[in-house]
Structure formats: C-alpha cells, structure tokens
C-alpha cells in the first residue's frame, strides 16, 4: 500500500487489512523523539509517491515483474503513468478525464449520497 497519509495513521489500517508492505509519509522526529512538523524525504503524494516507491524498492531489493496501482486522485497520475496496470476507482473529475483519455480501467462504486434518505 502506498499512501500520502502519515505512517502513524496508515499502519493500523494496513495491519487491519493484512497488508504486508506500507509506503507512507513519515513525520520527521527530533533527537528527543518529538515531531518537528516536517516530513522525511518529501510528502508521499504526487511525484513524491514515485520517490518513496523507488527508495522502498532500493531498500528492500524487491523487484516485481508487474505493477498494479489503484487510485482515486489526480495527484497520483505520475505513479499511474509508470505502472503496468493503472486502475481508477471513484476518481475525482481530473483523474476521470485523464483515465478516459488513456483507456485505463475505471470503476465507479460510490452511491450518490445526495439521493440517500436518512433512517
């Protein structure tokens, strides 16, 4: 799983779903172990996801033969353009347009909440 969310929030989600590998944004810590308000490397979003993925691949030595990436955000276009199988799920309007232009798989799953009645 690769996410812009900080590790401390993303790790419990990854653990819950049994996701073995997590690539996330890491907050910078000072010598006393307190957060500085900065991040290590760069935020794991946009082109930063590529930076984090490349660092992770180099660190682990992992080299998959096939890459699949799921996203809902146009911020992920740089990574989506690098994988073998980009899959778009409930995208924002910019990503939806880009996906259609590139004939990427597109899944629309969300229910229109405006039409739902409160019980």
Image (cartoon, rainbow, N blue to C red):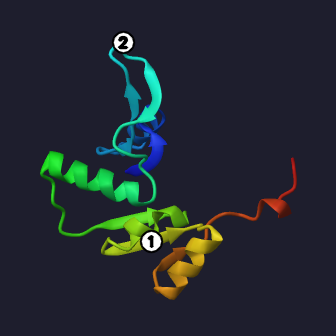
Residue most toward the left? 61
Q: Quadrant of residue 111?
A: bottom right
Residue wearing tag 1? 87
Crowdedness near tag 2: few (<14), some (14–19) or many (≥20) residues, C-alpha within 10 Å:
few
**Residue at the image point whose x is 46% and y is 81% from the top:** 104
Instruction: From the viewer's side, name the closer residue of 12 and 38.
Output: 38
**Residue at the image point whose x is 29% and y is 54% from the top:** 53
* SS for dot 1: strand
Instruction: Pinpoint residue 16: horizontal percent, then vertical percent.
Output: 43, 38
Instruction: Pinpoint residue 50: horizontal percent, then vertical percent.
Output: 33, 59
* SS for dot 2: loop
Q: Which mark is residue 31?
A: none
Instruction: Pinpoint residue 14: horizontal percent, then vertical percent.
Output: 40, 41
**Residue at the image point whose x is 40% and y is 72% from the top:** 86
* 2 vs 1, front mark: 2
**For residue 72, side relative to residue 17 (left or right):** right
Instruction: Pinpoint residue 96: horizontal percent, then vertical percent.
Output: 58, 76
**For residue 61, side relative to residue 13 (left or right):** left
**For residue 106, side relative to residue 68 (left or right):** right
- Disc 2 versus disc 1: distance between alpha carbons? 42 Å
Residue wearing tag 2? 32
- In the displayed structure, 54 sits above or below 40; it is below
């Amino acid at each position: 799983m690769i996410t812009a969310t900080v590790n401390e929030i993303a790790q419990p989600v990854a653990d819950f779903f049994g996701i073995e590998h997590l690539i996330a944004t890491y907050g910078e810590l000072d010598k006393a172990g307190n957060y500085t308000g900065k991040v290590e490397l760069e935020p794991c979003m946009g082109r930063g996801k590529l930076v984090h993925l490349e660092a992770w691949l180099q660190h682990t030595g992992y080299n998959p033969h096939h890459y699949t990436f799921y996203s809902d955000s146009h911020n992920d276009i740089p990574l989506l353009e690098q994988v073998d199988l980009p899959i778009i799920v409930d995208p924002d309007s910019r990503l939806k347009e880009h996906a259609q232009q590139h004939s990427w798989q597109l899944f629309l799953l969300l229910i229109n909440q405006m039409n739902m009645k409160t019980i």
